[in-house]
Image (spheres, grey):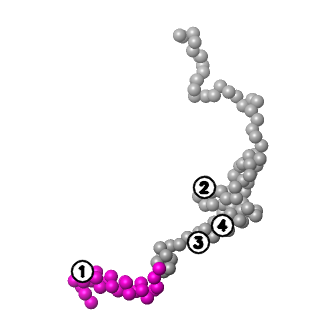
Amino acid sequence: MADRTLKGSRIGSTSLQGETGVELSPRRTVEYVTDKGVSFAVIFDADAEPPPEWADQRSGEIGFLDDEAGRTARAELEAKESAQRTPWDMLIERRSREELEELLEERLKLLRARRGTAK
């Protein structure tokens, strides 16, 4: 058993394979710009098509390419954000402002009657 061990080697903690003969694929750096004007770089494979938007790992903000695809992606994101309806928007679609004020007065009267402070 003792004749099978490798002396002076830490098997498992270090790789026995060297860097010789290893050729990395060609890469390119792509710049993205956030709405605040902060630019950051992402490295892609030379053949890969970079996406029009990418999240910055430091700040978490979304950056866009400075080309036509990036401008299109930015416009789509802004349109989607502006198209989101809030609960208030949905309420105003169903009721007029006068109806809402009337309902508010009714509910306030009920609450005051329950507390015993009717006005």
Residue 43, magenta (yes or no): no
Of all residues, the one furthest to the bottom in this rendering is 119
Residue position marked by numbered label 4 in the rendering: 76
Q: Compare marks 2 and 3 and give the one earlier in the sequence.
A: 2
Residue 60, image quadrant: bottom right
Depicted 4 relative to depicted 14: above or below: above
Amino acid at pointer 1: Arg
Depicted 9 relative to depicted 77: above or below: above
Q: Residues within 10 Å of mark 2 (few under 14, many from 20)?
A: few
Distance, label 2 to label 3, CA atoms, is 28 Å
Residue 106, image quadrant: bottom left
Amino acid at pointer 2: Arg
Residue 90 visible in image: yes
Q: Which mark is residue 83?
A: 3
In the image shown, does 1 or 106 lie closer to the viewer? 106
Do the CB atoms of the residues marked 3 and 1 lie less than 8 Å apart? no
Q: Compare marks 1 and 4 and give the one earlier in the sequence.
A: 4
Residue 96, magenta (yes or no): yes
Span of residues in magenta = 94-119
Distance, label 3 to label 1, CA atoms, is 41 Å
Distance, label 1 to label 2, CA atoms, is 53 Å
Amino acid at pointer 4: Glu
Q: Which mark is residue 58?
A: 2
